[in-house]
């Protein structure tokens, strides 16, 4: 699976699972910060739990602890790269 196909699938899953109704997939780029309310998606801690579940369900990739989550959840692009690096 390419990074581009991971990104497309992840955008669709995030919009559906996190109920981001007013966010289009075109508005999410590699530089989009996931937890920044000012310049990003403004996700919160509950969204983080749901996002971990989404990544596991959609890609079979586990995010086992807070240190890994911090690395993976910086930007949308860092999450795509994390998934690509950890897919079986």
Image (cartoon, grey):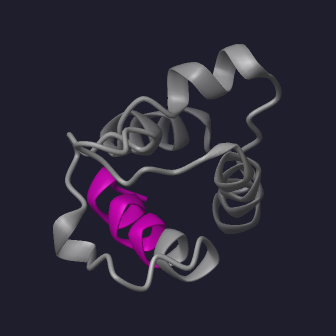
Report whether 82 appears left or right of 6.
right
Residue at 20% across, 54% down: 29
Residue 78, percent from left and from top: 38, 33
Q: Quadrant of residue 87?
A: top right
| Span highlighted in magenta in the image | 1-12
Q: Residue furthest right?
A: 64
**In this picture, is 31 found above or below 41?**
above
Residue 36, percent from left and from top: 37, 38
Q: Quadrant of the N terminus?
A: bottom left
Residue 83, percent from left and from top: 53, 43
Report whether 81 appears left or right of 64.
left
**39 or 81: nearer the eye?**
39
Residue at 82% across, 29% down: 64
Whether residue 79 is in magenta: the answer is no
State whether the magenta stretch is mostly helix, strand or loop: helix
Q: Residue furthest front?
A: 38
Q: Quadrant of residue 33?
A: top left
């Amino acid at each position: 699976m390419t990074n581009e196909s991971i990104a497309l699938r992840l955008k669709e899953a995030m919009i559906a699972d996190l109920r981001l109704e007013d966010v289009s997939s075109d508005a999410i780029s590699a530089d989009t910060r996931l937890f920044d309310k000012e310049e990003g998606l403004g996700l919160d801690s509950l969204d983080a739990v749901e996002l971990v579940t989404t990544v596991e369900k959609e890609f079979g990739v586990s995010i086992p602890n807070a240190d890994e989550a911090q690395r993976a959840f910086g930007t949308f692009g860092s999450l795509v790269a994390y998934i690509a690096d950890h897919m079986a």
